[in-house]
Image (cartoon, grey):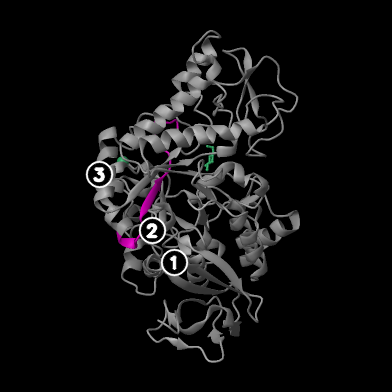
Amino acid sequence: MRDYWHKDAVIYCVEVETFKDGNGDGIGDFRGLTDQLPYIAGLGFTTIWLLPFHPTPFLDNGYDVTDYFGVDSRLGTLGDFVTFINQAHSHGLRVMIDLVVNHTSNQHPWFQSARSDAKSYYRDFYVWEKHKPKNADQGTVFPGIQKSTWSFDRTAGQYYFHRFYHFQPDLNISNPTVREEICRIIGLWLQLGVSGFRVDAAPFLIEMKGADTPQSQEQYQYLREFREFLSWRTGDAILLAEANVTMDTIEDYFGDGDKIHMLFNFMLNQYLFLALARKEAAPLLEGMLKPPPIPENCQWANFLRNHDELDLGRLSDAQREEVFHEFGPQRNMQLYGRGLRRRLASMFNGDLQRLTMAYSLLLSLPGTPVIRYGDEIGMGEDLSLKERNSIRTPMQWSAGANAGFSNARPNKLFRPVISGGQFGYERVNVAAQRCDSHSLLNFIERCIRMRKECPEFGRGSWKSMETNNPSVFAHSVEWATGTVLAIHNLSDKSCRLKIDLSGCKAERLMDLLRSEKDIPLKGKTLQLNLKGYDHRWFRVIRAEQ
Ligand code: NOJ
Ligand code: CA
């Protein structure tokens, strides 16, 4: 068996500043995070994905870096980072980190030097124009907030390109020195023990920068260049790219298995939410069928919610409206004209049955699941915070002061904790859910354990199964170790389900989540009573077994 660890991974996404404050100054830090490693390992996660932790003005949650070789002093020291990695490894956890090299902060010394001297070594690290390009007002990633992709820098006397906010000038990847620098960054963190990188904004990172520069095939070569460097330094390290792109370019990212190892499945995510909104299986199947087949060593990363808005930009306007209507009807729940800035639990109005169904689905979909901190207990959002910060509030550890996140005075907290109401820390917290065997937290732990006993979900080839009910999504996954089935009722209505299993030569089904009794298959048709939002997993037992 090839050791494709990324295919068996269950990934936990954490941002240091909001997870746990270890020194009482109101900001989460590496010491706090290190203390909580047993919690993450205990839940069964295998890999941590750390959001950016480098020195930063924190204008975009650390996605505005001023030094790629350091740790922001508010979060700890390089020594604290190394202790964290060491302890993570002791707990059997791998660590992946964000690689944010599409752009730097405008406070980065490279940009400071580049802007102040046209002859600076760093001038060509960025993308400049004397005159504002004609298309400058197109292509911003944060419409409604950031108006242009070109801003005038008075010191430089020129315009610079920025795909994201104006304080994030894009690096000029066409410059070989910039690419060398990126390899140095990759090299440092690999040497310090990380197992891979989540490549931020991959399509923009590799684009030929500039006003009317046509995009070319050549840009995808950079991915091979980075991959080659990565693999030479650390053979089993991986690249997980953020690339919300059209399906005709997927092949350009995976190559022949010699470029990116994993891509977030944004397409599936959007169709999954359409399916959840409609309570119908068909859009989910449509989303699963959209991507082309991928090389054997590559993998999709699946998620329900991430740290950004729920981006629905690939749905039609009418479809997006359906999702907005169901999950975020108020204007201030919506963002950038395409997304929702809410957590999953609040979109489901705290419905535990619906939440467990959604996580069961996530953990059984073909690919590697990624779960964001706080979602395992069903945290909500704070819509009074700006843009995507609504879903970046401190982890709710207990009903104690500051949700157990920090000992600091409440006005010193990096962000306020969510207090009061259905999703306040007084009601939604780790301590309470630990003691409740029916909690979301305990469900997710059990479900991750069973997922690990079913490597088929991460590695096998899947088929959808026809059922007699349009709200039920049923699929089977087959691999060298066997065949598993997963059945999910996306609707709140109960039903008598029938599935024809004559194709899978099953004699019995082992119930993986609910009961120790096998289900004998009479006449090769599986008949089941499903409650609203029910979910079932089975292992196929064949006659010869
Ligand atoms: C994508 C990240 O997910 C987002 O949070 C960030 O604002 C942009 N990239 C810019 O780095
Ligand atoms: Ca702190």
Would residue 331 be counted in the magenta stretch?
no
Q: Identify the residue position indicated by label 1 in the image.
A: 480
Determine whether label 2 and label 1 are within 8 Å by CB. yes
Q: Cα distance, mark 2 to mark 1? A: 9 Å
Residue 435 in which image quadrant: bottom left
Q: Could you tell me what secondary structure mostly forms the magenta stretch?
A: loop
On-image quarter of the N terminus: bottom left
Q: Which residue is drawn at 40% across and 56% down?
A: 9
Q: Mark 3 points at which residue?
A: 86
- Residue marked by disc 2: 1
Q: Which of marks 3 and 1 is in front?
A: 1
Instruction: Estimate the x, y position of residue 453 in percent, counting from the top left.
Output: 37, 68
Q: Is residue 55 magenta?
A: yes
What residue span does the magenta drawing correspond to? 42-57
Q: Residues within 10 Å of mark 1 (few under 14, many from 20)?
A: few
Q: In the image, which is nearer the foreground, mark 3 or mark 2?
A: 2
- Give residue 464's quadrant in the image: bottom right
Q: Are marks 3 and 2 in contact (CB under 8 Å)?
A: no
- Nearer-the-camera pick, 523 or 465: 523
Look at the numbered disc 3 and say if its residue's Cβ is closer than 8 Å to ligand 2: no
Which residue is rendered at x = 66% and y = 60% of the image? 323
Task: Mark 2: give few (<14), some (14-19) or many (20+) Cα within 10 Å.
Answer: few
The tag earlier along the polypeptide, 2 or 1, is 2
| Res 543 seen here | yes
Question: In the rendered image of this protein, does residue 260 appear above or below residue 467?
Answer: above
Question: Which residue is outermost to the bottom?
Answer: 522
Q: Earlier in the sequence, mark 3 or mark 1?
A: 3
Label 1 CB, ligand 1: below 8 Å? no
Position of the C terminus by quadrant: bottom left
User: Please, what secondary structure does the residue beneath circle 1 have?
Assistant: loop
| SS label for mark 3 | helix
